[in-house]
Image (cartoon, grey):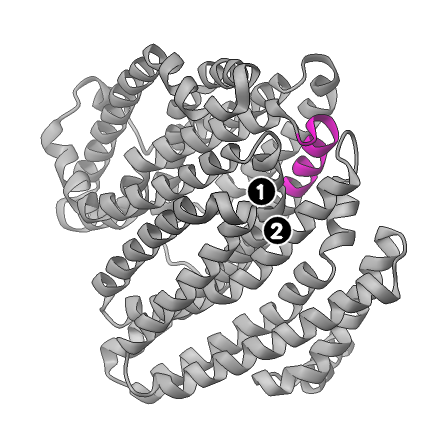
């Protein structure tokens, strides 16, 4: 296997993912324009949640562990055995997924009546229709996932990301063209065109790289599949709980009435992007470096790496959270106030968006200490408390959704992960006391800046969306420069070094 420049690869992947996520925001804005807060949009979101949950429930652990196990087989048993095993796994995935699709198609009316009951008769009809149309995507999505994993195992990282970005752009074109003609089904058509295009490109690339031979598919072996299944077994229960949580949250939102699921989806988009960015920093930088220093027994290096990465993360948070909280209304107004979405809908979306922004302060504590445990060979503790967090979130949502409405979802997410994050901190070493104090201080600074920007946006500058956003950005940048030394970043020094590099290149 050829060597990989980790920093260069992770940086390029990070940029490609940011581009893809920005394209997805355009898609969300268009869906708001054409479908707004409606019963068909709720039905579509519920179907997508169910299908993605089923895909990850059945194949998520295999997808997550495939690359590591494939490399292990390749190094110990040879490339030929590893590829034959992967071919047998692919055959098994195709057969099982087709059987699963058949069973789900037969049970579709029952599933629709249960899942979309509170959307009314029309909601059930929309759900059933979209569900049947999207069932084949179970197979297409999983073939894309496993094909991407195989290419990743050969250090081919950019092709899936680049093609994914291009197909997302194609999806937007299809939406613009067909939404006025066939309504919500334009999303279904766009999704199929995008995913099938990606699948064709991935398969062509696999063939050109001579990674697979057709004869291996004709003689699959269960014995060759077992290593992948056994390796992934410990992850099935955490995945199951996670997907149950994901779907029940969206199902519970439908109990609150038509349109609430759409509002929840619009509100969550921003923190999902933020979590992807922060997760990318942790998985590509902090965890590998921490694991290496832990194995070498160098406690001082371990502490230094933690401190540096926490500084980077909170540098991102110092800009992102005040923006998502303080500028929430103009952002939501700019992206979503189109079509049939009313001012009241925008206000509801804004409120939930702000709650999710604050909730992320609890989530980030959970992520930081969880990854520290993971890098310290305490992954079982991380997995155990991760499952507990999901179960408590599910129970809290069920218990209080009728009292608090949509607010319960960000509230339970933030509070439960904050508590579990604190428990995971207690499972660490004594050195983490100083780290915990630093994180608490950073969170307080971010809350203060966020609230200040919110007051500015709401009371001082009640103007059009874009000028309001620009004024919020200027305020956040000014506040971040003033507060950054308190979280360990010397903004002036960083700015000077950047300018010097620009001048030297010029």
Q: Furthest residue to the left?
A: 223
* Whole-percent x, y for residue 396 in the image: 39, 51
Residue topped by disc 1: 264
For the stretch drawn in magenta, the main secondary structure is helix
Which one is nearer the viewer's eye here, 347 or 323? 347
Residue 393 horizontal side relative to residue 23, left or right: left
* Residue at x 60% of width, y 29% of height: 258
Which one is nearer the viewer's eye here, 137 or 351? 351
In the picture, the quarter occupied by the C terminus is: bottom right
SS at mark 1 in the image: helix
Q: Furthest residue to the front?
A: 403
* Whole-percent x, y for residue 214 in the image: 28, 21
Q: Where on the picture, by quarter, is residue 303?
A: bottom left
Q: Is residue 110 magenta?
A: no
**Region in magenta:** 24-37
* Whole-percent x, y for residue 313 in the image: 53, 70
Q: Where on the picture, by quarter, is residue 247?
A: top left
Residue topped by disc 2: 352
From this view, report whether residue 198 is shown above or below residue 75: above
């Amino acid at each position: 296997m050829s060597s990989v420049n980790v920093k260069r690869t992770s940086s390029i992947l990070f940029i490609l993912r940011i581009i893809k996520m920005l394209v997805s925001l355009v898609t969300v804005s268009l869906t708001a324009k054409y479908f707004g807060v409606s019963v068909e949009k709720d039905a579509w979101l519920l179907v997508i949640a169910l299908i993605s949950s089923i895909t990850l429930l059945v194949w998520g652990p295999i997808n997550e562990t495939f690359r590591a196990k494939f490399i292990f087989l390749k190094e110990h048993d040879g490339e030929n055995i590893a590829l034959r095993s992967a071919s047998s796994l692919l055959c098994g995935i195709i057969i099982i997924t087709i059987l699963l699709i058949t069973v789900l198609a037969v049970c579709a009316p029952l599933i629709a009546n249960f899942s979309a009951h509170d959307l009314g008769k029309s909601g059930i009809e929309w759900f059933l229709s979209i569900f049947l149309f999207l069932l084949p995507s179970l197979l297409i999505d999983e073939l894309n996932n496993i094909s991407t994993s195989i290419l990743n195992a050969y250090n081919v990282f950019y092709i899936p990301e680049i093609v994914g970005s291009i197909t997302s752009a194609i999806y937007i074109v299809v939406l613009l063209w067909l939404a006025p003609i066939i309504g919500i089904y334009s999303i279904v058509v766009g999704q199929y065109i995008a995913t099938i295009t990606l699948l064709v490109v991935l398969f062509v690339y696999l063939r050109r790289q001579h990674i697979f031979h057709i004869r291996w598919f004709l003689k699959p072996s269960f014995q060759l599949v077992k290593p992948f299944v056994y390796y992934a077994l410990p992850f099935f229960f955490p995945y199951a709980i996670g997907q149950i949580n994901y779907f029940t949250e969206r199902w519970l939102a439908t109990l609150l009435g038509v349109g609430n699921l759409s509002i929840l989806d619009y509100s969550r988009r921003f923190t999902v992007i933020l979590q992807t960015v922060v997760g990318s920093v942790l998985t590509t930088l902090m965890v590998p470096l921490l694991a290496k220093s832990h194995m070498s027994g160098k406690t001082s290096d371990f502490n230094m790496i933690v401190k540096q990465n926490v500084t980077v993360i909170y540098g991102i948070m110092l800009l992102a959270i005040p923006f998502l909280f303080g500028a929430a209304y103009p952002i939501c107004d700019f992206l979503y106030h189109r079509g049939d979405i009313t001012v009241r809908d925008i206000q509801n979306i804004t409120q939930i968006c702000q709650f999710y922004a604050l909730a992320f302060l609890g989530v980030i504590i959970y992520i930081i200490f969880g990854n520290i445990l993971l890098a310290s060979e305490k992954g079982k503790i991380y997995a155990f408390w991760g499952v507990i967090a999901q179960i408590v979130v599910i129970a809290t949502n069920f218990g209080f959704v009728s009292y608090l409405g949509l607010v319960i979802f960000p509230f339970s997410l933030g509070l439960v992960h904050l508590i579990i994050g604190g428990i995971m901190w207690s499972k660490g070493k004594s050195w983490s006391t100083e780290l915990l104090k630093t994180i608490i201080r950073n969170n307080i600074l971010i809350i203060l800046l966020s609230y200040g920007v919110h007051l500015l946006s709401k009371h001082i500058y009640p103007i059009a969306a874009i000028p309001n956003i620009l004024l919020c950005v200027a305020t956040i940048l000014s506040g971040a420069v003033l507060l950054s030394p308190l979280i360990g970043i010397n903004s002036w020094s960083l700015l000077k070094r950047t300018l010097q590099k620009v001048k030297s290149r010029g």
